[in-house]
Image: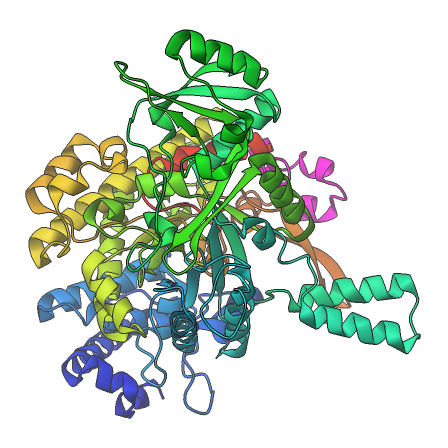
Amino acid sequence: MFLDIFKHKGKFVDLCGKKNLKNYQNLYLILKKKQNNAEVPVHPENNYLGDNDLARNIYEKKYFVKDLNNQLIEKNPEDLFVRVSSFIASIEPDPARAEECAVQFYKYLYEGYFVPGGRVLAGAGDLYRLKTLSNCFVTQIESDNIEAIYNSAYECARTYSYGGGIGVDISPLRPKDSIVHNAADSSTGAVSFMELFSLTTGLIGQSGRRGALMLTIDVKHPDIVEFVRVKKIPNWVTDQIIEQLKWSNQFEEDQIKEIQKQVMENTQVRFANISIKVSDEFMQAVDEQNTYGKNKILVYKKFNKKVLNKALQDVDCHYSYQIPAKNIDEYELFHVFENISGLNDYLYKNYELILTEDDMNNAFKRDVYGDVVLSIENEPFDLAVRYSGDFMLYFASEPTGEIRKLQKAREIWDAFVEGNYRTAEPGLIFWSRMSKYSPSNYVDRPISCTNPCAEVPLEKGGACNLASINLSRMVRNGFTKNAEIDWATLRKVTETTVRFLDNVVSWNELLNPLEKQRTAASETRRLGLGTMGAADLLNQLGIAYDSTEGIELVEKVMETVCNAAYQASAKLAAEKGPSPIFNYDKYSHGPFFKEALNVETKELIKKNGLRNIALLAIAPTGSISNIVLSFVNGNRNYLGVSSGIEPIFSLFYTRRSESFGNKFFKVFHSTIQAYIDLHNLNNQVEHAQTEAELTESLPNYFFRTAHHVDADRRVEIQGRCQKYVDHSISST
């Protein structure tokens, strides 16, 4: 029986406090009573999930609470909705407000208006097991030494034990072959420590799954090429196994190659996603080389006359965000020369300056951005000279000294493209733009890495607290000529979900695994409110996903969610107090504030401040999108929506049923099945043998699925949405 959970005396109780847990129990009993009295909705046939085996399997394996004997003590989604709603509402300081919130949270969860992230569904109110309510965190390697590296690995392990994932940036670690002051002659490099974090991730279990890990490196780090190739270059494990196979003389050469491939896939940083933090500076160098080749000499006007010849990564100046990235807006291409002779003719004639081949080829005669900088008196600019495509790899600290490598940007880019083609990694994070648009960077909490899915760039100790508004349920009269978006409900659901997530943050101030994580939660109060079901919304309106009308409508939806969320946070700031680090004068300088928010929102923020420094992120929603309500027809619930802002993956898949004599039948995406049922088309679609035959029964806009949407159009849709997301979008 679920109520036995309140008798359990464990670490969870010690952390949360008896008062909070008493509030939770009271609200739980109130909601249960309201269920029994039909004051809150319960499925009339006690069959919320219908015959959806996938949704039931996900609920039972991932989200329903089990007792200490691993027996389920929740049987249906309504049980989970009571638990989550009562627990999250119980942190409200006012009892009457807490009850009001619990009821509203329950109703919205039941109606499928929003779904919190998986850690909240699994952990909220489970007093048997100590779990974080945040999906993922970021930790930082504080210093370039063994103690700091292994402390970061410990922080990963502790986070995994609470059910969270983590991101680690290895950029602060000195490059391979640099100086060390111990028994070794030189450092094994930043990349060598990736295996430590990967193995730590693989060792810590999380209810039958492993933790999630993201490893990143700055594109300027001298080990960047080794990082890009880490998943395809044999490590010591692979080498030893292959050497033994060769000595055995029992395998042919082609067999050994296949075994080597399999071993590499299972031993090379196996338990991590990897991504490169690329800068505008790097992408400009790639573009230069594509445009001019690699031997042209480019001369830029440099309007910032400060010259940076050295930048140390010591103490608190961590490489991942403290080394100044080149601001390409301060440079203007002036001249392109075929050779140094032509360059010198121009320089001497106009400025009485000469450059030698050594000046152009010696990395130590350039600034940290790889430019030879020529000071020009009596002009508002200096000259920055470089070969097209030159890119400076750079690392400097007191123990290691300076390490500089001039590399053609295209060589790094080509290695990235090859690795991505072969292994689907590394990913690419446009770090200059992320940093520019990150609201926390303007209140002295600069981002240092991302969560494992990369949609939430975070400061050290920061966490992503996720929930998604279900756009499929924001339509009135779906699949009729009167279908329309319920804008008022969309705004109200957004406001309620912001409050829900802010309460999650309040719980995480108590429940996060590490002190730095609890501190970060209380300082930034960062949220990750996103959306899912965009394609289902458009289907119900009769609009193609990739049509101009569809793209413009989804953009309007995101603009509405964005401003409603920020207004909700400002109202919470008036009620409960703003984030302790919020500063309007600093915050309002951020480009996201300037570009995404309307006048009404800005005025409310200026008046009240913000409860949450950043609020929006579109997560993959891989599991929760399969269990959420998409459409209701009478007593029948249709479950499952398109994930994030993605198109529907496929109209249907084919399934074999043992109970019907191993017959194969089609399982359609939920909202498409709803349309089929509404129009009595089951016989027609079941007998259709090809997609072309289905077009005779189904409207054309249904067929704009993942395999039919043009890639450029897909990027355009994401770009339109990103304008109104202050974190990022994880696209699958």
Q: Is residue 202 left or right of residue 100?
A: right
Q: Is residue 704 magenta?
A: yes
Q: Is residue 382 magenta?
A: no
Quadrant of the image occupied by residue 554: top left
* Image location of residue 290, percent across then percent down: 60, 26
* Image location of residue 14, percent across then percent down: 23, 86
* Image location of residue 274, percent across then percent down: 53, 56
| Residue extending farthest top | 349
What residue is at 44 percent from the left and 60 percent from the top?
Answer: 173
What residue is at 39 percent from the left and 68 percent from the top?
Answer: 119
26 relative to 478, above or below:
below
Q: Is residue 87 visible?
A: yes
Q: Is residue 38 left or right of residue 692?
A: left
Over which residues does the magenta segment extend?
683-709
Q: Quadrant of the N terminus?
A: bottom left
Q: Is residue 306 left or right of residue 431?
A: left
Quadrant of the image occupied by residue 601: top left
Give the colour scheme of this rendering: rainbow
Pick whichever, 587 or 129, lies toward us: 587
